[in-house]
Image: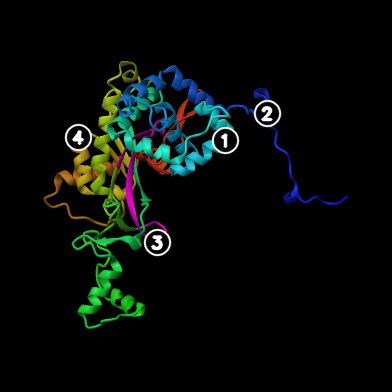
Amino acid sequence: MAMGRRSRRQRQKEFWIAATELPKTAAHPFYRRLNESLDQHGFDPFVEGRCEKFYAPKMGRPSLAPGLYFRSLLIGYFEGLDSERGIAWRIADSLSLRRFLRIEIEETTPDHSTISRTRRLIDLETHREVFTWVLQLLAKEGLLQGGTIGVDATTLEANAALRSIVRRATGERYEEFLRRLAAESGIETPTRQQLVKLDKKRKKKGSNDEWGHPHDPDAKITKMKDGRTHLAHKAEQAVDLETGAVIAVTLAGADQGDTTTIAETVTEAAEQVAAVAADEEANEKLAAEGVREVVADKGYHSNDVLTDLAALEIRSYISEPDRGRRCWRGKQPQREAVYANRRRIQGDRGKRLLRAVRREGGASVCTLVGDGWGCGAPNFGPERMF
């Protein structure tokens, strides 16, 4: 029996296809359960009311309904997609996701430009309101407590090329700057090798105070975990360690240390828990005193961090690096905070919490699992999500 050549097969397409013969697939149980919960609590009317002011009264370019837009962002998280192009392609390719978005097979799925345009039109405050609404839903389901949070950070590579940076003072590109230095040193027409040699002799040549990207000024030059140098951002997440739900996410410069950013993240988490508690039904399921315990790895350990948390009556469970014997002369408050933290992390509860924060890694988001909400693991946090 001869093997046919698939590349030469030609099939005449049907001119008419009955609606009953269109391809159908069983809905994914995860997305089916998610839609049921969102419908039960009135997600679509809520987001439509909040986003109405961003839509024109007259028909212009075909718009993306708010409920469909936010569901598309959820798909980006649950499917591990970090771009609008990836989200648009995944939606167009999956019949199950079409059913989640309630887009019929004969309808066109939203393209990446429409998703991106909608995201830019809806302001950050509205995104925050939607995020708080989701946290309130979690609390009503008994899957958000807000008493014990884990804090961790991750470095996100910016969508900006390092070769495109410019000098903040003059606006010169990097090569133009080197050629000017070469001319000042007496080399009128420097070769590529001469520019490289001149660049190697310079100190602090990658200073964020002197260099930046013209289209992403917040991106900072930093070394990634794999050793490469890129423009990047730092995202820091606060996660409810009892359930795995992300409570808050803050963005900072990638060149800032963990000990300088944790205060903002803990404050944001406390404010989010307070906002969730504004709903009476959600408040009944939350921890009575709000955020009262913070767990983090040794990158967050410092005298100032432990002292500040103790002043706020927040118990710290932060891994302590080996610094050898220390001198506490004139530092009694810092000594008490460090020793109290050391006693807590050496106990059974402290060890369990530290294992939990290492497992969660501060990078989970709320997802629906089984009969309730749980946690998943996308590539970025809620601030990027909304």
Judged from the image, the secondary structure of the residue bearing numbered disc 3 is loop
Q: CA distance from mark 4 to mark 1?
A: 49 Å
Q: CA distance from mark 3 to mark 4?
A: 37 Å
Q: Tell me the element at label 4.
A: loop
With respect to residue 315, does 304 lie above or below?
below
Q: Of marks 2 and 4, which one's residue comes earlier in the chain?
A: 2
Residue 178, given in percent of the width and then of the height, sits at 27, 72
Residue 96 lies left or right of residue 285; in this view the side is right
- CB atoms at circles 3 and 4 under 8 Å apart? no
Q: CA distance from mark 2 to mark 4?
A: 70 Å
The chief SS type of the magenta part is: strand
Quadrant hosting residue 382 = top left
Name which of mark 3 and mark 4 comes first in the sequence. 3
The residue under label 4 is 312
Q: Nearer the viewer, mark 2 or mark 1?
A: 2
Above or below, comparing residue 378 to residue 292 in the picture: below
**To which quarter of the image does residue 383 belong?**
top left
Q: Position of residue 135 (x, y in %)?
A: 36, 27
Of the residues under marks 2 and 1, which one precedes in the sequence?
2
Depth check, mark 4 against mark 1: the one in front is: 1
| Closer-to-camera residue (93/311) | 93
For label 2, count other residues whose C-alpha is less than 10 Å away and answer few (under 14), some (14-19) or many (20+).
Answer: few
What secondary structure is marked by label 2? loop
Query: What range of the chain is rendered magenta?
Result: 224-250
Q: Amino acid at mark 3?
A: Gly
* Magenta highlight on residue 244: yes
The secondary structure type at the circle numbered 1 is: loop
| Residue where numbered disc 2 is placed | 16
| Residue 306 on the magenta segment | no
Q: Which residue is mark 1?
A: 94
**Position of residue 278 in the picture relative to residue 79 (left or right):** left
| Tag 2 and tag 1, C-beta contact below 8 Å | no
